[in-house]
Amino acid sequence: MSLGMFAYDAFMFYFEKFGLDDMRKEILEDVNGTVLELGPGTGINLKYYDMEKIKSLAYIDIKFKDGLEIKARKKYPNITMIEGDAQKLPFEDNIFDSIVFTLVFCSVKNQLEGLNEVKRVLKENGTIYFIEHVEPHEGILKYVFNKTNHQWKYITGGCNLNRNTEFVLKDAGFDIKIIDRKFRDIFIGGIGIAVN
């Protein structure tokens, strides 16, 4: 494990244990149909999916972590795994019922470009399911996140602490419903549909 991944996993342990686990349970319970997950990481979301609701499951990531394929195929043997970039998805238009991304768009270089691609491959009546960490609204946390972002991004391989993903989702043409906020609104989770 690289220093970056070690730092990120250590940082995230507390948040997963005391909030994100519950958020994932609530947000991901209705994922269904033809499903695409962007940046699956270690495959943490697998345990929250109701596999009886899923017709097909595809993962896309810049590079898959060791052991992920074995773990994923135990849960969903027919999973499709593709190395690729969220900013240029290798799929036809309008093919997924559900698109999932959790803690992904903090590290996508061009968020708007990636979300436009998500919208392109999502069916007209499809749904996005998301959890992201975002820049704090105000106060000392906002200052600290902005002050340390350059160093944090460097040691974690591209994760930004000060993204405004909630607003970029709206800019990309999604009507979103925030279902939960955790840790003084640093983490947001919800669902959305494309409206334009």
Image (tube, rainbow, N blue to C red):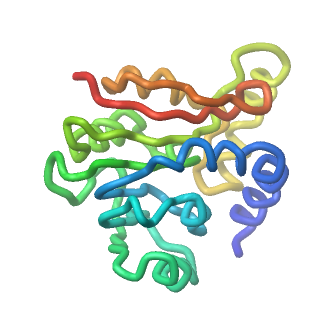
Viewed as shown, does residue 143 lie left or right of 189?
right
The residue furthest top is 138
Total number of numbered discs in the rendering: 0
Q: Is residue 186 above or below residue 37?
A: above
Viewed as shown, does residue 148 lie left or right of 77?
right
Quadrant occupied by the C terminus: top left
Along the viewing direction, whichever of 92 and 1 lies nearer the viewer:
92
The residue furthest left is 92
Viewed as shown, does residue 154 lie left or right of 126?
right
Quadrant occupied by the N terminus: bottom right
Q: Residue at x 40, y 82 (%)?
A: 77
Q: Is residue 174 above or below residue 30?
A: above
Q: Residue at x 56, y 67 (%)?
A: 43
Q: Residue at x 64, y 30 (%)?
A: 180
Q: Is residue 13 above or below residue 168?
A: below
Where is residue 67? Give x, y as percent: 57, 83
Where is residue 32? Give x, y as percent: 37, 53
Looking at the rendering, which quadrant does residue 54 occupy? bottom left
Q: Is residue 29 above or below residue 194?
A: below
Where is residue 185? Give x, y as percent: 71, 25
Along the viewing direction, whichever of 169 and 33 lies nearer the viewer:
33
Q: Residue at x 35, y 42 (%)?
A: 114
Looking at the rendering, which quadrant does residue 125 occupy? top left
Looking at the rendering, which quadrant does residue 4 occupy? bottom right
